[in-house]
Image (cartoon, helix red, strand yellow):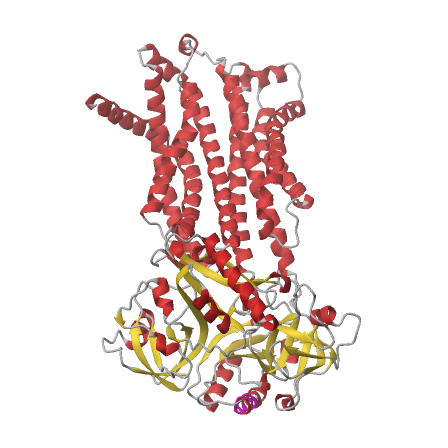
Amino acid sequence: MRTLLLDISQDLRFSARTLARNPAFTIAAVLALALGIGANTAIFSVVNAVALRPFPWKDSGRLVRIWESAPQLGWPRFSTSIPNFIDWRAQNHVYEDIAAWRGAELNLTGLEEAQRVEGGAVTASFFTTLGVQPSRGRFFLPDEEKPGADARVAVISHGLWTRSFGADPKIVGRTLVLNGADSTVVGVLPESFQWVLPSDILVPLVLDPAANRSNHVLIVMGRLRPGVTLERADAEMNGIAARLAAQYPDSNKGWSTQQAQVARWIVNRDVRRALLVLTAAVGFVLLIACANVTNLLLARAAGRRREIAIRAALGAGRMRVVRQLLTESALVGLAGGGAGLLLALWGVDLLRSLNPQTIPRIDEVSVDLRVLAFTLGLSLLTSLVFGLAPALQSSRPDVADALKEGGRGAPTGSMRHRARSALVTAEVAFSLVLLVGAGLLLRSFWRLTRVDPGFAPAGVVTMKINLPESKYPSAGEIQTFYEALFARLRAHPGVAGVATVSIVPFGYGNTANEVVIEGRPDDPGGAKASADWRLVSPGYFRAMGIPLHEGRDFESRDGAGPGVVVVSEAMARRYWPGADPIGKRMRPRGGKDWMTVVGVAGDVAHRGLDEAPAPLLYFCAYSSNWNPMSLVVRTGSDPASVTTAARDAVHALDRDLPVSEVSTLESLRDASVAPQHFNTLLLALFAVLALTLASVGIYGVMAYAVSQRTHEIGIRMALGSPRRDVLRLIVAQAMRPTLAGIVLGLTAALAATRLMQSLLFGVSPRDPVTFLAVAAILVAVALAACLVPARRASRVDPMTALRYE
């Protein structure tokens, strides 16, 4: 054992001296590996945080997200109604706990400055389902969620406690003013608490069995009983859904359930597919880097033939030589891993800055012990990958030939050339797959950004306002406030239009409902008419630049008069095909009063640019006391000045109203395509890196080939061969492995790009334009990479070349 340790120590010292004497080789090899290992480490840190690191909940594998499902309505996974949740909780035997969450917009006043906080209304079982204990006080009691309990209590997050209350140790029992009403703090969440949606303040969710079963508002999850499988739970919950459909056909017919682990809900299929594509991309980059370093080692081995032969002649066995050469490779790999780790630290910060929202748990991405272990293992593995073949080949020298003075014509030369050409072929193939993937995403993203959203986002500022029910209990009082606000804003010289909407385009969330169309029976299979819906004030279509194709806009009197609606073109086409919808009547399912269609508006990409506009209903905002609402202001001047004017106008009417979520529609549009932008940017970056490494590899092979054939080229030129023939010879030699790599790469890309189908918009994964363009780019890059060595070969002095040995 001691002898082995001494041998390893000697190998390490000798390897370090050898690498130090060849700084050009060492720097080139370490840099190539650093790029490949750094990219892999950065992406693995994301995979580790998103998919591998357990969620901070007790037995998180037993946590299940439960949806109502109506695929025939375009809602394969939909939120749940309160009465259905109550029945689920009472009738199931597969969950030991089942809980519900509903978003709540809360104005927190009574402090130095009013602020809007992200909140949620939750059942008392929410905390036990997640397995959370309060850091202070208690959580909600079951009696506090019953109708009529009037439980004015709240649980606050650790962040809000420290941020707004200075970590006051006497916070429990303190009174907060939420939406104008007093609430008592009964507990504080632990600092480690995490929930999928931001919730600084939680209040009890009142469960009214008499609520409308067609009003789907709840996010539901459950904790499986020990030993219960997801399949068994799915079967039981669908059985309950079938019984409810028979019992309440008007609201539940055609509805079933879907279930998935909470981890699968958070890290959904699109996220997993994107991570898989990026992981494959950085894997290709690393393989290309390894091929480059292998080429460097093969070229270096030619210059070390005499050294290896002398060591063999002095008695060094083959395995001893292999071990020494692999030790050198390991040092290069570890140095590349160390440099790659530094690049990964920078890359992780870059990833967080590029993508703060599109990847779940992005804030948790860090270089932890698992990532360090991954980098170390990857460094050692790559040293074996790029070092083994050159080590085995160099360990079998022809001693007699290698020791001859000037002995260059070793039979291994052609073998090394074939090996180097094969590596170039692999590099080109890997690069082509990456470039095709990046090209498809670029074309997809370009087409996505060219989609007409249905409105004019330029110059529109939006902000959210929540009018508390305690101060604005009726729709009339809400209308009075907004009309006064509009009057103030229209007096501002930069304002061209102003209105309100319940959810702005590309904003978070969606509202949808089944509807009853007068004279249109439900389909025999149970499919019902359905539509997304928005509440808007008069002037909304003008402020947003949405065209009204028929009929009229809302008017102030529509809030108190007979119910009227404006429908989108998509809704008119689906439910009144070939007919004029103006004057037709419909009502939300569960509602009693018929509403008359008074206008047809252009389609709007509310859900996103990558989704076809769904049927959409617009209701007059003045007909309800819905809150919160988003203010939209069209301006031809500086948006910042209009934002300031809007804040001042709101506070002049009510100083306790916070204005939040200030943004422009252009930034919301950009945020809606942020996932596609992120994936495209990263894959394009890795593709460019791969192309650069491949071009360096092609250049290195050709430069080495020219140096090996200098004598032959001199003879050709001495015998009268023109320079263009020499140039053609060298270029043809370079293009053979390149063209072979392109053929292999195209074949591999045809198979690999099928994984990208869900990431593409308006582009086929086998798009011929992209494939041909990438192949042409690679041919051009290969020609450019071999041009310098080829020109050098064509200018060889025959007399100098004939003396070359």
Query: Is 783 on the left-hand or right-hand side of 240?
Result: right
Q: Using the rendered image of the protein, determine whether residue 671 is visible from the camera's viewpoint.
A: no
Q: Position of residue 303 (x, y in %)?
A: 42, 20
Identify the magenta region: 477-484
Q: Position of residue 711 (x, y in %)?
A: 55, 16
Characterize the magenta stretch by its predominant secondary structure: helix
Q: Is residue 481 magenta?
A: yes
Query: Is 374 on the left-hand or right-hand side of 234?
Result: left
Q: Position of residue 794 (x, y in %)?
A: 61, 25
User: Residue shown at 52%/91% (left/top)?
Assistant: 477
Q: Is 373 located above or below residue 206 in the figure?
A: above
User: Residue shown at 35%/74% (left/top)?
Assistant: 142
Q: Position of residue 360 (x, y in %)?
A: 44, 58
User: Residue shown at 49%/58% (left/top)?
Assistant: 236
Q: Nearer the viewer, residue 758 or 15?
A: 758
Q: Nearer the viewer, residue 726 or 151?
A: 151
Q: Residue furthest left?
A: 2
Q: Is 557 located above or below residue 385 in the figure?
A: below
Q: Using the rendered image of the protein, determine whether residue 766 is visible from the camera's viewpoint.
A: yes
Number of on-image labels:
0
Give residue 8's quadrant in the image: top left
Q: Is 132 located above or below residue 764 in the figure?
A: below
On-image quarter of the N terminus: top left
Q: Residue furthest right?
A: 578
Q: Is 418 located above or below residue 532 in the figure?
A: above
User: Residue shown at 56%/42% (left/top)?
Assistant: 434
Give residue 253's quadrant in the image: bottom right
Q: Is residue 22 magenta?
A: no
Q: Nearer the viewer, residue 122 or 488?
A: 122
